[in-house]
Image: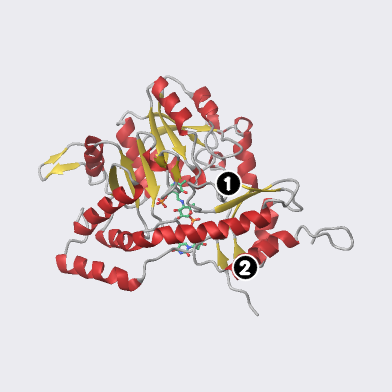
């Protein structure tokens, strides 16, 4: 029997019948974008759900990071310190905002930017830190804020992975001057494409609302070089319909993460990056590090799974500093990024999404564990 393809993720979509009344109201109002009524309802609902003061909805998180950084840095540019280990959207967005990128190494345990490395890389030209809560695991926010305060520089979080992720003080998205979350189809919570910038005060929120709408203040005044990064009414409608379902989705993700964790944690050479029992997790993804103690390399395991129609993903390989547009920067020298290099070589993200059936998850687990069983000749499978 041919096995079904398993992807690393599948989008969570609201039931069509719950979306339809919202679509009907868009059709009858003829307000389809530019901050219409559904958009207003959705941003208020998000502020409440995430317990954050101000939400500016955007077309995607990449534009959110770019414009958030632009808001903090102004037009003069400057150096921005960011982790070498992230999705390419992080560094590309900063580049488009006019930043001179400075790549920092990560903490080997959390795979988040290492505050000691940030401190080491600060120069008189440093304008901002662009940190990433990788996989929804919290950065050392207190240490990063302390550095930002002492050096009088901005702190922005790429919180693309952080929907509903918390630490003891509340949402991870409350940290820094600004935070940006993604609502892409592959995330815990989705508007198909979309995202939000979280700010702390009404003036910043107003400035961001203008920046994502070409810098328009009113019909005759445009005071900044803004962009078009608005979320449409249709995307906001998907979000509004999906919001009541996200808690149940996260619960299911936690059950699946626990099954992975329990069956993989004792396999020599494998390390599960995200502990399943951290109460603040949103279980966005299930990354493992495939180390030297495992019978094959990460890329070999990736290929082996693919042969069985299991499409795990190497988020994030290659490392940002190996990409052609960044590799010649002084901070891209691999000698200064040993932990990022190791993570990129070893990381593999396993299929995880609410609709993943236990039988399908067992296919993934069987494929990973059977490789460790020695054959009669003493070799592994
Ligand atoms: N910062 C960080 C740290 C990020 O990780 C990201 C995005 C961003 C910023 C930027 O956020 P956005 O601007 O996107 O809001 C995916 C996503 O496109 C991207 O959002 C995400 N991170 C990144 C980690 O993964 P790809 O190129 O790997 O996606 P793709 O199309 O290969 O999809 C992966 C799997 O998901 C597919 O094999 C099948 C499944 N899938 C995907 C889509 C799009 C579906 O089943 N249905 C779908 O509609 O980048």
Q: Residues within 10 Å of mark 2 (few under 14, many from 20)?
A: some
Which residue appears at 75% of the width and 62% of the height? 370
Which residue appears at 30% of the width and 48% of the height? 47
Tell me, for residue 116, which label it has, or none. Answer: none
Q: Which numbered disc, 2 or 1, marks the residue that appears first in the sequence?
A: 2
Can the viewer see residue 363 in this picture?
yes
Q: State the residue in front, 376 or 87.
A: 376
Quadrant of the rendered structure where residue 336 is?
top right
Q: Nearer the viewer, mark 2 or mark 1?
A: 2
Residue sitting farthest toward the bottom: 1
Query: Where residue 109 sits in the image (x, y, percent)?
Result: 60, 39
The residue indicated by pointer 2 is 309
Quadrant in the picture for the C terminus: bottom right
Tell me, for residue 318, which label it has, or none. Answer: 1
Question: In the rendered image of this protein, does residue 183 appear above or below residue 21?
Answer: above
Query: Where residue 151 sits in the image (x, y, percent)?
Result: 41, 21
Which residue appears at 58% of the width and 46% of the height? 318
Badge 2 marks a residue whose secondary structure is loop
Which residue appears at 21% of the width and 53% of the height? 35
Q: State the residue in front, 336 or 49.
A: 49
Query: Where residue 167 sits in the image (x, y, percent)?
Result: 45, 41
Give the colour scheme of this rendering. Answer: secondary structure
Badge 1 marks a residue whose secondary structure is loop
Quadrant in the picture for the N terminus: bottom right
């Amino acid at each position: 029997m041919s096995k079904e393809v398993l992807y690393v993720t599948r989008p969570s979509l609201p039931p069509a019948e719950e979306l339809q009344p919202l679509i009907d109201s868009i059709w009858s109002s003829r307000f389809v974008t530019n901050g219409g009524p559904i958009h207003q309802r959705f941003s208020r609902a998000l502020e409440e759900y995430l317990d954050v003061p101000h939400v500016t909805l955007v077309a995607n998180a990449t534009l959110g990071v770019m414009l958030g950084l632009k808001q903090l840095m102004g037009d003069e540019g400057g150096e921005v310190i960011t982790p070498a280990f992230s999705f390419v959207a992080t560094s590309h967005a900063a580049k488009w905002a006019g930043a001179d990128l400075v790549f920092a190494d990560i903490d080997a345990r959390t795979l988040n930017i290492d505050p000691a490395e940030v401190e080491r890389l600060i120069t008189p030209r440093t304008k901002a830190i662009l940190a990433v809560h990788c996989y929804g695991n919290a950065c050392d926010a207190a240490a990063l804020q302390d550095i930002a305060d002492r050096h009088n520089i901005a702190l922005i979080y790429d919180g693309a992975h952080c929907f509903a992720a918390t630490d003891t003080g509340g949402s991870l998205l409350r940290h820094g001057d600004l935070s940006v979350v993604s609502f892409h189809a592959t995330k815990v919570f989705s508007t198909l494409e979309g995202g939000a910038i979280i700010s702390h005060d009404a003036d910043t929120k107003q400035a961001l609302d203008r920046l994502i709408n070409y810098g328009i203040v009113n019909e005759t005044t445009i005071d900044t070089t803004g962009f078009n990064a608005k979320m449409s009414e249709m995307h906001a409608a998907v979000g509004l319909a999906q919001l009541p379902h996200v808690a149940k989705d996260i619960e299911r993700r936690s059950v699946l993460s626990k099954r992975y964790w329990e069956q993989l944690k004792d396999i020599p050479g494998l390390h599960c990056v995200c502990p399943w029992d951290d109460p603040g997790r949103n279980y966005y993804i299930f990354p493992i590090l495939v180390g030297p103690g495992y019978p094959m390399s990460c890329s070999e395991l990736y290929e082996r799974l693919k042969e069985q129609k299991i499409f795990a993903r190497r988020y994030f390989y290659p490392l940002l500093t190996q990409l052609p547009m960044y590799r010649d920067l002084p901070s891209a020298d691999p000698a200064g990024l040993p932990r990022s290099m190791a993570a990129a070589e070893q990381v593999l993200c396993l299929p995880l999404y609410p609709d993943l059936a236990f039988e399908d998850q067992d296919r993934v687990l069987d494929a990973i564990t059977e490789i460790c069983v020695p054959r009669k000749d003493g070799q592994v499978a």
